[in-house]
Amino acid sequence: MSTMPEVNPARLLTSIADFAAIGATPAGGVNRQALSVEDRTARRLLAERAFARGFTVFQDEAANLFLRRDGRDATLPPLLIGSHLDSQPTGGRYDGALGTLSAFEVLEALADAGVETDRAIEVVAFTNEEGSRFSPGCMGSMAFAGAGNLSDWRRARATDGALLADELAATLQALPEARMRPIGHAISAFVELHIEQGPVLEREDVPIGVVTAVQGTKWLEIAFSGEAAHAGTTPLEFRKDPMGAAAAAIARIQGDIMPADPAARLTVGRITAEPGSINVIPSRVSFTVDIRHPDAAALAAMDRRVREECEAAGARWGCETAIELRVDMAPGRFAPEVTAAIEETCRALAIRSRPMVSGAFHDALFVGRVAPAAMIFVPCRNGISHNEAEFVSDAHIIAGARILLGVALRLSAA
Ligand code: GLV
Ligand code: MN
Ligand code: MN
Ligand code: MN
């Protein structure tokens, strides 16, 4: 006999606290970067909970982790729900974990109620969504969707020096009980619950965002090479100073691009000077530029502008300029049939919602290229994310999980 499945609030909130303890930082956030020991611990905990419930656990060669609850008809491709478990170095407790653990709560709620779905439902934790330790972000979902090639990334070095190939192998080996499966298996659809990571829902007091699109992102790595020289003795005309070039370039792009276009986003998040000594003019300065825009043509124009300003600043300071495009994510639109299922579920549960565009990129952007996909957003306090202070109220967590359960019920029916 089956009953109406219901999210178990206490279980879900406890689960979020349990995972927040893995890689917990003193300031209340998490440092659980992709393929780290902490990431492996979190994957193991989730897999053990899945084994305990009788679900099947799979990994693919990108170490994407899948927890499957079978459906009535094994010939139907499964519905995929979930997100990621890796975090930023000073990340919050909810970015990724909320969607992954709510998806697992959906499976448990269905199992508790004895509900048999037509198609199987699989929970996924995609590998390296954040891209902070290894670039690019969304590595697991890109590989899953054939939007990137794992073999191109195997030689990638982490910010801490580790080699991606080694960390991937160690992560896969840390879960030997999981079955290996070929990457990119067929799915019927993908639904990802996530915190908004911005201020809109909270400002408008709307508990659910129905995400219809994701803006585009490009990551550039700029390097100026000059000549190391003595800080005290080298007059201006003798200097080939890459820090001068970097400062000038950053001032121009920061000063002009966002003020000119309210939809544009530009961030210089990492800067490195070599040799990095107080009284040595650096020989090399490199920095990252993250640019975003919902419109592909506007994003391309931002990219051109950044390159022009950097080339000009490098030339002014007598430096070589090298520019590499590390990430190129075109804007994406989600599937109307999936956003409609989310909206209908919100109406059925009398939970207010509004459509919105995601400013962050997500695994659903790539999975959406190979299957119908969409996202559910819940508000976070002050719109703060990628920050240890990230906070989501219990009520919003439960509302999001209830919507995910309702959508999963709709989309798992044949
Ligand atoms: C993902 O974390 C992003 O930077 O949008
Ligand atoms: Mn995320
Ligand atoms: Mn993130
Ligand atoms: Mn993200």
Image (cartoon, rainbow, N blue to C red):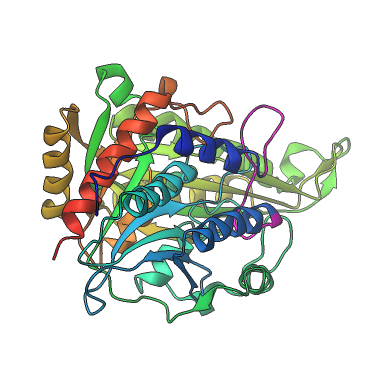
Q: Main secondary structure of the magenta part?
A: loop
- 254 is higher (above) or lower (below) than 341: above
Residue at 44% x, 41% y is 98
Q: Is residue 121 left or right of residue 59?
A: left
Nearer to me, 134 or 106? 106
Whether residue 218 is visible: no
Count up the numbered dots: 0
Nearer to me, 22 or 267? 22
Q: Position of residue 6 (x, y in %)?
A: 30, 40
Question: Where, quadrant-wise, is the C terminus in this rendering?
Answer: bottom left
The residue segment tinted magenta is 23-37
Q: Is residue 325 left or right of residue 194?
A: right
Residue at 60% x, 36% y is 247
Does 150 lie within the magenta span? no
Q: Is residue 3 left or right of residue 20?
A: left
Q: Is residue 102 left or right of residue 117?
A: right
**Quadrant in which residue 147 is drawn:** bottom left
Does 26 lie within the magenta span? yes
Residue at 29% x, 38% y is 402
Q: Position of residue 233 (x, y in %)?
A: 88, 38
